[in-house]
Image: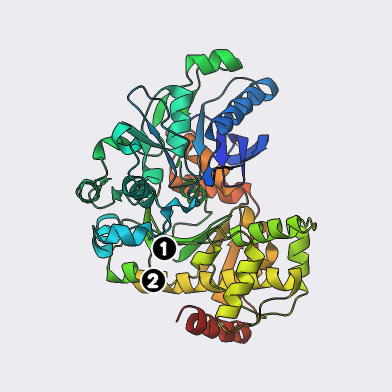
Amino acid sequence: MPDRGRFLTFDLGAESGRAVLGAVECGKLSLTDVHRFPNEPQRVLGRFYWDTVRLFAEIKKGIALCVQEHGPALEGMGVDTWGVDYALLDSNDELLGLPYHYRDHRTDGVMNRTFEIVPRADIYNATGIQFMQLNTLFQLMAQRLSGSPILDQAQTLLFTPDLLHFWLTGQKANEFTIATTSQCYDPRARDWARPMLERLGIPSRLFGEIVEPGTVLGLLHPSVRSELGAGAVPVIAPATHDTGSAVAAAPAEGKDDWAYISCGTWSLVGVETPGPVISEKTLEYNLTNEGGVYGTTRLLRNVMGLWILQQSRRSWERQGHAYTYEELARQADDAPPFAALVDPDAPSFLNPDDMVEAIGAFCRETGQRAPVGVASTVRTIIESLALKYRWVIERLEEVTGGRIETIHMIGGGIQNRGLCQATADACDRRVLAGPVEATAAGNVLVQAIATGHVGSLEAGRAMIRASFPLVEYQPQRRADWDAAYSLFVTRLRG
């Protein structure tokens, strides 16, 4: 087994992207920032799009900077991004329109119209995926129901990381973990849900070959190499869904008594299972079965996450108050507890014009006083997220029959220590927080396993434990949180 390897990873999130150089050496993994850049979706005539071509330009800039600052020798590179969004290509492999953002309002009301064609239970039985109007399936149905000619013209559907890998290599493929986010994939057949798609009038020709995480897609395209002065680097598909990469880096020790919460714009709360869990109960609880690495399934629930805090911060910025996340966290610590509670997954929080006003409106509609001031609003968000995590954890235990003892919190959101402590308190379980850079670490880890620099997923997770600090949080104030949870499940989710 080679004793040293260097891998370039591109991790694109809803707000920002980064190029990170990962090095595997002497049983440890290190990460070095190469390039960070904003991800700024664009509104055009009332529509919401990703600026994907600019993101590709930033990826190329990351490669160039890596070559200049660290040399051209790399064992691999790979891209991960958020889920569900896609681009359509014509027969000449050219883009058909700008790629839509999953928060665009074109999918409003589309789920119910879709269920009139194929019942909700049939769709879930075929895909095992949580119902959200932003899913690829409903985005495609929005195009079909609007009479858009693009679906008839399109020949290929590539999810966002697939598209970026295609532009890097000239090779087209749909990577497994990102494909499973779409609600167009049948996890039991391990193929596209073609009968369901045909019933909905979505052409199955759009969906291509599915490749596993760790697949070498090809070498960096000669045009990119000559433009950037780079070598013939293998482009390796990691778990291209960012949560798939993050969970790969969860520092668990092989037992089945742990759950993960991947904290960012979204909070992904789940467990790792050996296969899909699709039943009447998982449908009732709207749990999702997404693909994991090396034969695993991520049974989880998507929770709205720190998007609510991000958008509240933007609301205050528009009023002339530019708070850092650290300042907001400190203010929340001093606010009275449980002044108000919200369901983070309420549809009104998906993409409101003013998040702070949306929080206030939700509270008033549920018979509560709206939080007053910045500190109280932030505390409402943090406590509501922690209580929603508990609700999901309990549902996961019910459908799997297991007991979760430890929650691994990973990702950038764990820098909010108040959220980590609130999660331990609300769930009455030990929380281990770390690593912060879980997605980049998991991306590198899959590349390292693919090239023989790490022997297995278990060995890789041991490497993660040896490489990054973990912070432990123990539950406190159980009675207060139990009372708040009772209110949460009866008033807000009852």
Quadrant assignment, res 62: top right
Relative to 258, is 458 above or below? above
Q: How many marks?
A: 2
Q: Can residue 12 be spotted in the picture?
A: yes
Residue 385 image position (x, y, % from top left)? 57, 69
Which residue is disc 2 drawn over? Answer: 402
Q: Can residue 451 be spotted in the picture?
A: no
Protein image colouring: rainbow
Label 1's element? loop
> Toward the viewer: 118 or 490?
118
Label 2's element? loop
Residue 306 image position (x, y, % from top left)? 60, 59
Rendered image: mark on residue 248: none
Residue type at mark 2: give it. Answer: Gly
Which residue is disc 1 drawn over? Answer: 256
Residue 68 image position (x, y, % from top left)? 68, 20
